[in-house]
Image (cartoon, rainbow, N blue to C red):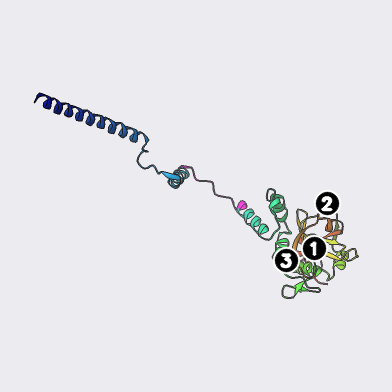
Amino acid sequence: MSLVFSAALLNRIAAAGLLAAGCAMAQAQGVAQAATTPPPGTMMGAYGQSLQQQQQQAATDKAAPAAKPATATNNAGDAVSRFLSERGLLNSSEQSAPARLLSSVRDTASDLVLSAMNFLGVRYTRGGNSVENGFDCSGFTRHIFEMSVGLVLPRRADEQAKDSSLLAIRRDDLKPGDLVFFNTMRATFSHVGIYVGEGKFIHAPRTGSAVRVEDMRDAYWAKRFTGARRADLKAASSGEGLPLTR
Protein backbone atom coordinates (compact mmCIF):
# COMPACT_ATOMS: atom_id res chain seq x y z
CA MET A 1 0.00 0.00 0.00
CA SER A 2 2.84 2.35 0.82
CA LEU A 3 4.46 1.54 -2.50
CA VAL A 4 1.27 2.40 -4.36
CA PHE A 5 0.98 5.71 -2.49
CA SER A 6 4.55 6.58 -3.17
CA ALA A 7 4.16 5.92 -6.90
CA ALA A 8 1.06 8.09 -7.08
CA LEU A 9 2.81 10.87 -5.20
CA LEU A 10 5.74 10.74 -7.56
CA ASN A 11 3.44 10.93 -10.58
CA ARG A 12 1.75 14.06 -9.16
CA ILE A 13 5.09 15.71 -8.49
CA ALA A 14 6.26 14.91 -12.02
CA ALA A 15 3.05 16.26 -13.52
CA ALA A 16 3.40 19.46 -11.49
CA GLY A 17 6.98 19.82 -12.71
CA LEU A 18 5.94 19.42 -16.36
CA LEU A 19 3.17 21.96 -15.90
CA ALA A 20 5.58 24.47 -14.40
CA ALA A 21 8.05 23.88 -17.20
CA GLY A 22 5.29 24.36 -19.77
CA CYS A 23 4.23 27.63 -18.19
CA ALA A 24 7.81 28.85 -18.12
CA MET A 25 8.23 28.00 -21.83
CA ALA A 26 4.98 29.73 -22.76
CA GLN A 27 6.05 32.83 -20.86
CA ALA A 28 9.43 32.81 -22.63
CA GLN A 29 7.74 32.49 -26.04
CA GLY A 30 5.38 35.33 -25.16
CA VAL A 31 8.31 37.57 -24.22
CA ALA A 32 10.11 36.74 -27.48
CA GLN A 33 6.98 37.40 -29.53
CA ALA A 34 6.45 40.70 -27.79
CA ALA A 35 10.04 41.68 -28.57
CA THR A 36 9.58 41.02 -32.33
CA THR A 37 6.03 42.32 -32.74
CA PRO A 38 6.00 45.84 -34.30
CA PRO A 39 4.21 48.64 -32.49
CA PRO A 40 0.53 49.23 -33.32
CA GLY A 41 -0.03 50.90 -36.70
CA THR A 42 3.13 49.50 -38.28
CA MET A 43 2.55 48.03 -41.74
CA MET A 44 4.35 44.83 -42.60
CA GLY A 45 5.53 43.54 -45.97
CA ALA A 46 6.90 45.42 -48.96
CA TYR A 47 3.54 46.86 -49.98
CA GLY A 48 2.68 47.94 -46.44
CA GLN A 49 6.09 49.54 -45.95
CA SER A 50 5.67 51.37 -49.25
CA LEU A 51 2.32 52.76 -48.12
CA GLN A 52 3.79 53.80 -44.81
CA GLN A 53 6.66 55.59 -46.54
CA GLN A 54 4.17 57.43 -48.73
CA GLN A 55 2.21 58.47 -45.66
CA GLN A 56 5.36 59.69 -43.95
CA GLN A 57 6.42 61.62 -47.07
CA ALA A 58 2.97 63.20 -47.34
CA ALA A 59 3.16 64.27 -43.70
CA THR A 60 6.62 65.77 -44.30
CA ASP A 61 5.46 67.64 -47.40
CA LYS A 62 2.45 68.98 -45.53
CA ALA A 63 4.64 70.22 -42.71
CA ALA A 64 7.13 71.86 -45.11
CA PRO A 65 6.63 75.58 -45.93
CA ALA A 66 4.73 76.28 -49.11
CA ALA A 67 6.88 76.81 -52.19
CA LYS A 68 7.07 80.28 -53.66
CA PRO A 69 4.73 80.71 -56.64
CA ALA A 70 6.45 80.69 -60.03
CA THR A 71 6.85 84.07 -61.63
CA ALA A 72 5.07 84.97 -64.84
CA THR A 73 8.42 84.96 -66.64
CA ASN A 74 9.16 81.41 -65.57
CA ASN A 75 5.69 80.28 -66.61
CA ALA A 76 6.12 81.92 -69.98
CA GLY A 77 9.53 80.31 -70.38
CA ASP A 78 8.15 76.88 -69.56
CA ALA A 79 5.37 77.34 -72.08
CA VAL A 80 7.77 78.37 -74.82
CA SER A 81 10.13 75.54 -73.89
CA ARG A 82 7.30 73.01 -74.15
CA PHE A 83 6.23 74.50 -77.48
CA LEU A 84 9.74 74.24 -78.91
CA SER A 85 10.18 70.71 -77.62
CA GLU A 86 6.85 69.57 -79.03
CA ARG A 87 7.74 71.06 -82.40
CA GLY A 88 11.11 69.26 -82.41
CA LEU A 89 13.21 72.40 -82.10
CA LEU A 90 14.89 71.21 -78.91
CA ASN A 91 16.17 67.66 -79.03
CA SER A 92 17.18 65.53 -76.04
CA SER A 93 20.86 66.42 -76.29
CA GLU A 94 20.08 70.13 -75.98
CA GLN A 95 17.64 70.06 -73.06
CA SER A 96 20.47 71.07 -70.72
CA ALA A 97 20.87 74.44 -72.41
CA PRO A 98 17.52 75.68 -73.73
CA ALA A 99 17.94 79.12 -72.17
CA ARG A 100 20.08 80.46 -75.02
CA LEU A 101 17.54 79.48 -77.62
CA LEU A 102 14.59 80.72 -75.59
CA SER A 103 16.22 84.08 -74.91
CA SER A 104 17.08 84.49 -78.58
CA VAL A 105 13.52 83.71 -79.65
CA ARG A 106 12.03 86.24 -77.23
CA ASP A 107 12.75 89.34 -79.30
CA THR A 108 11.18 91.14 -82.24
CA ALA A 109 11.42 87.98 -84.32
CA SER A 110 9.62 85.77 -81.81
CA ASP A 111 6.23 86.02 -83.48
CA LEU A 112 7.77 85.34 -86.87
CA VAL A 113 9.72 82.28 -85.67
CA LEU A 114 6.85 80.82 -83.67
CA SER A 115 4.48 81.43 -86.56
CA ALA A 116 6.85 79.56 -88.85
CA MET A 117 6.96 76.59 -86.49
CA ASN A 118 3.19 76.38 -86.55
CA PHE A 119 3.55 75.16 -90.13
CA LEU A 120 5.81 72.23 -89.34
CA GLY A 121 4.58 69.19 -91.26
CA VAL A 122 2.93 71.10 -94.12
CA ARG A 123 3.86 69.25 -97.30
CA TYR A 124 6.33 70.53 -99.87
CA THR A 125 4.80 71.51 -103.20
CA ARG A 126 6.82 73.00 -106.01
CA GLY A 127 5.48 76.52 -106.61
CA GLY A 128 3.24 76.26 -103.53
CA ASN A 129 2.61 79.23 -101.30
CA SER A 130 -0.27 78.24 -99.02
CA VAL A 131 -1.17 75.70 -96.34
CA GLU A 132 -3.85 74.21 -98.56
CA ASN A 133 -1.56 73.72 -101.55
CA GLY A 134 1.72 73.22 -99.69
CA PHE A 135 4.90 75.29 -99.80
CA ASP A 136 8.14 75.39 -101.67
CA CYS A 137 11.09 77.04 -99.92
CA SER A 138 10.56 80.64 -101.04
CA GLY A 139 6.78 80.32 -100.94
CA PHE A 140 7.11 79.36 -97.29
CA THR A 141 9.39 82.27 -96.32
CA ARG A 142 7.24 84.73 -98.26
CA HIS A 143 4.08 83.50 -96.56
CA ILE A 144 5.58 83.68 -93.05
CA PHE A 145 6.99 87.20 -93.46
CA GLU A 146 3.78 88.55 -94.94
CA MET A 147 1.54 86.84 -92.38
CA SER A 148 3.57 87.65 -89.25
CA VAL A 149 5.12 91.09 -89.91
CA GLY A 150 3.37 92.32 -93.05
CA LEU A 151 6.50 92.29 -95.22
CA VAL A 152 5.90 90.91 -98.71
CA LEU A 153 9.12 89.39 -100.03
CA PRO A 154 9.87 88.65 -103.69
CA ARG A 155 8.63 85.24 -104.82
CA ARG A 156 11.83 83.39 -105.70
CA ALA A 157 14.74 82.54 -103.39
CA ASP A 158 17.35 84.31 -105.53
CA GLU A 159 15.14 87.40 -105.71
CA GLN A 160 14.81 87.44 -101.93
CA ALA A 161 18.61 87.22 -101.57
CA LYS A 162 19.09 90.14 -103.95
CA ASP A 163 16.37 92.36 -102.51
CA SER A 164 17.98 95.71 -101.79
CA SER A 165 15.77 96.31 -98.75
CA LEU A 166 17.34 93.35 -96.92
CA LEU A 167 20.69 93.62 -95.18
CA ALA A 168 23.41 91.02 -95.82
CA ILE A 169 24.42 89.27 -92.58
CA ARG A 170 27.48 87.22 -91.72
CA ARG A 171 26.91 83.71 -90.47
CA ASP A 172 28.40 84.57 -87.08
CA ASP A 173 25.85 87.37 -86.65
CA LEU A 174 22.70 85.37 -87.37
CA LYS A 175 19.62 86.07 -85.29
CA PRO A 176 16.18 84.40 -85.24
CA GLY A 177 14.09 85.63 -88.15
CA ASP A 178 17.01 86.06 -90.58
CA LEU A 179 16.73 84.46 -94.01
CA VAL A 180 19.41 81.86 -94.73
CA PHE A 181 20.34 80.80 -98.25
CA PHE A 182 21.93 77.68 -99.69
CA ASN A 183 23.21 76.34 -102.99
CA THR A 184 21.20 73.15 -103.52
CA MET A 185 20.71 73.30 -107.32
CA ARG A 186 24.10 74.52 -108.50
CA ALA A 187 22.91 78.09 -108.02
CA THR A 188 24.16 80.42 -105.30
CA PHE A 189 20.75 81.30 -103.86
CA SER A 190 18.63 78.34 -104.91
CA HIS A 191 17.21 77.51 -101.46
CA VAL A 192 16.02 79.63 -98.53
CA GLY A 193 14.84 79.11 -94.97
CA ILE A 194 14.33 81.06 -91.74
CA TYR A 195 16.92 80.96 -88.98
CA VAL A 196 15.40 80.04 -85.60
CA GLY A 197 18.46 80.06 -83.31
CA GLU A 198 21.14 77.69 -82.02
CA GLY A 199 22.34 76.85 -85.52
CA LYS A 200 18.92 75.68 -86.71
CA PHE A 201 16.62 76.84 -89.47
CA ILE A 202 13.10 75.99 -90.61
CA HIS A 203 12.31 75.44 -94.27
CA ALA A 204 10.32 73.56 -96.89
CA PRO A 205 13.04 71.20 -98.15
CA ARG A 206 12.05 69.21 -101.24
CA THR A 207 9.42 67.13 -103.02
CA GLY A 208 8.18 64.27 -100.87
CA SER A 209 9.06 66.06 -97.65
CA ALA A 210 7.43 68.68 -95.43
CA VAL A 211 8.28 71.86 -93.52
CA ARG A 212 10.80 70.96 -90.83
CA VAL A 213 13.67 72.20 -88.65
CA GLU A 214 17.23 71.23 -89.52
CA ASP A 215 20.70 72.02 -88.27
CA MET A 216 22.84 74.29 -90.45
CA ARG A 217 25.93 72.71 -88.89
CA ASP A 218 25.21 69.36 -90.53
CA ALA A 219 27.72 68.66 -93.27
CA TYR A 220 25.18 68.87 -96.10
CA TRP A 221 23.98 72.35 -95.16
CA ALA A 222 27.29 73.68 -93.85
CA LYS A 223 29.03 73.30 -97.19
CA ARG A 224 26.07 74.72 -99.13
CA PHE A 225 25.45 77.86 -97.06
CA THR A 226 25.77 80.93 -99.30
CA GLY A 227 24.60 83.84 -97.17
CA ALA A 228 21.97 85.42 -94.96
CA ARG A 229 19.71 88.45 -95.09
CA ARG A 230 17.93 90.47 -92.42
CA ALA A 231 14.82 92.60 -92.65
CA ASP A 232 14.02 95.46 -90.30
CA LEU A 233 11.19 93.60 -88.62
CA LYS A 234 10.28 96.46 -86.28
CA ALA A 235 9.84 98.80 -89.21
CA ALA A 236 7.94 96.17 -91.17
CA SER A 237 5.56 95.40 -88.33
CA SER A 238 4.85 99.11 -87.81
CA GLY A 239 4.49 99.80 -91.52
CA GLU A 240 7.53 102.08 -91.66
CA GLY A 241 10.81 101.97 -93.51
CA LEU A 242 10.22 99.01 -95.82
CA PRO A 243 7.92 98.56 -98.79
CA LEU A 244 5.17 96.07 -97.98
CA THR A 245 4.18 95.23 -101.53
CA ARG A 246 6.11 94.12 -104.59
Residue 66 part of the magenta segment: yes
State the residue at coordinates (13%, 25%).
6
Separation of marks 3 and 2 at Cα, in angstroms = 25 Å
Task: State the residue lying farthest toward the bottom.
Answer: 133
- x%, y% of residue 223? 87, 56
- Mark sitting earlier along the chain (3/2): 3
Separation of marks 2 and 1 at Cα, in angstroms = 17 Å
Q: Nearer the viewer, residue 222 or 49?
A: 49
Q: Nearer the viewer, residue 146 or 115?
A: 115
Q: Which label number is shown at residue 193?
A: 1
Separation of marks 3 and 1 at Cα, in angstroms = 15 Å
Q: Which residue is mark 3?
A: 148
- x%, y% of residue 80? 65, 57
* Main secondary structure along the magenta-highlighted residues: loop
Q: Which label number is shown at residue 172?
A: 2
- x%, y% of residue 177? 77, 60
In the shown orientation, is residue 54 left or right of residue 15?
A: right
